[in-house]
Image (tube, helix red, strand yellow):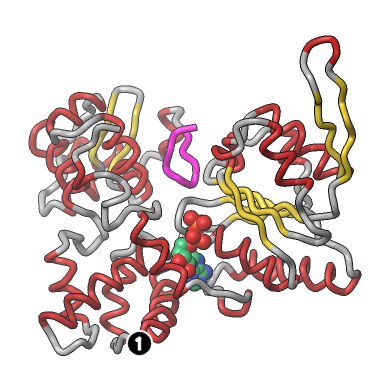
Amino acid sequence: MTARPEFEPSLALVSPHAAEADREAEASVRPRRLAEFVAQHRVREQLQLLLASALRRGSPPDHILLSGAPGLGKTTLAMIVAAELGAGLRVTSGPAIERAGDLAAILTSLSAGDVLFIDEIHRIARPAEELLYSAMEDFRVDVVIGKGPGATAVPLEVEPFTLVGATTRAGLLTGPMRDRFGFVGHLDFYEPAELEQLLARSASILGVPAEPDGLAEIAARSRGTPRVANRLLRRVRDYAEVRADGVVTRETAKAALAVYDVDERGLDRLDRAVLSALVESFGGGPVGLSTLAVAVGEQPDTVEEVCEPYLVRAGLLARTPRGRVATAAAWRHLGRTPPGSILGAASAPPDLFGTRFDADGDTD
Ligand code: ADP
C-alpha cells in the first residue's frame, strides 16, 4: 500500500491491527487464564465447558474456530486454551503456510496434546488446507515425496492435537474446513462498560492510577475493541505523566485524546476528513470511492480498508451501489443539520442496497 505514513493502518492510533510497537506492550496485559478474560460471557462459558470436559476425559478437546474482527481477543483465547489445558502451544498463520510441506513439518513435530494456533486461517494455501483436513480428522498426513510419475505418498502419524483457528472473515472459510471444527466461537465488539472493566484491569497491571471517569472516557473512544482501548490507555498515561500529575482522570483523558486527534466517538483525523469531504464537498453523496479518496488526498485502498469498516459499523457512512453516502448521524457528528432528503433513507437497512457486511465491516 502506498498510503501516507501517518495514515498507515499500523500507525493509526485507532487501528484494530497490531503495530510492532503494540506487541510487547500487549504481552504484559494479556489475560493468561479464562477467568481473567473480560466479557464475551457466552464464548467463555462454552469454552470453559469444552476444556473442563476434555481435561476430565484426559483427551484433547475438539478443534476450535474463533471468528471476529481484529483486536477482539482471538489470539489471547488461543493462548488461554493452551494454558488451561496445560498444553504446549505452537503459533503460525495462514499466510505463513505457503506450501503443504511447511504445514507437514509443523504437524509432525507436535507433541501429544499440543495446541496449534493458526491465525488468519482463511488465508491458508489450498494444498496445505487439504493436508490439514486429514490431520484434523485422522491425525495423519500424506506427504508426497518426489515429483511426476515416480512420486509416492508417505503416510505420517501426527500426535493428537487441538487446532485453534482464528479468522476475521469466517465467510471466506471453505465448507469442509468449517465442518472440521467441533466448536465455533464468535467474538463480538465490546460494550463501553466492558471496555471500562478491561481498562481498569490493564491500568492496575501497568501501575497507572486511574479514576473510573477517565477510563470511561477512553472506553467510549475505543471502537468496541480491546486492542484500541489498551493503546489509548498508554497514550493517555503518557500525557498524564508529562502534563499532569500522572492520574488518568476524565480531564486528562479528554485533553490527551484531543492532542492525538481521537474524537469522542473514536474517529481520527482521516475518518473525519472522509466524512467532511462527503458532507461539505459532495452534499452527503453518493460519491464513488476513488473520487472520495482524491478529495482527502489518500489512496482508495486506505479509505476503504482503514476508515470505512468503522464508519459503516458506527452508522456514519453507508456503502451503496451508487457510491458512498453520509448518514444523518454523520451530518450531526460534524455539527451540521442533515438535509430532509436523507432522514428517511438513513434508517433504511444496508441490505436494501443488496450489500452485506461482515464483522469487519467489509463487503463479502
Ligand atoms: P486478535 O487476535 O483478535 O486480533 P488479541 O487476542 O491479540 O486480538 O487481543 C488484542 C489485545 O487486547 C491483547 O493485548 C489482549 O490482551 C487484549 N484483550 C483482548 N480481549 C481481551 C479480553 N476479553 N480481556 C482482556 N484483554 C483483552
Residue 68 in the figure: left or right of residue 287? right
> Which secondary structure, mark 1?
loop
Q: In the displayed structure, would residue 276 be above or below residue 195?
A: above
Tell me where the magenta segment starts and ends, as one range. Answer: 356-364
Relative depth, front residue between 253 and 33 = 33
Residue 240 in the figure: left or right of residue 76? left
Q: In the displayed structure, would residue 119 be above or below residue 261?
A: above
Would you say residue 190 is visible in this rendering? no
Quarter location, residue 208: bottom left
Relative depth, front residue between 89 and 303 = 89
Q: Position of residue 88 (x, y in %)?
A: 71, 64
Query: Which residue is tagged 1?
Result: 207
Q: Amino acid at mark 1?
A: Gly
Residue 106 in the figure: left or right of residue 203? right
Q: Position of residue 190 (x, y in %)?
A: 45, 64
Relative depth, front residue between 320 and 209 = 209
Picture residue at 79% right of the left edge, 11% below the top: 148
Q: Position of residue 157 (x, y in %)?
A: 88, 44
Relative depth, front residue between 234 and 290 = 234
Q: In the displayed structure, would residue 263 be above or below residue 300?
A: below
Picture residue at 71% right of the left edge, 41% below the top: 178
Q: Position of residue 239 (x, y in %)?
A: 17, 76
Would you say residue 192 is visible in this rendering? yes
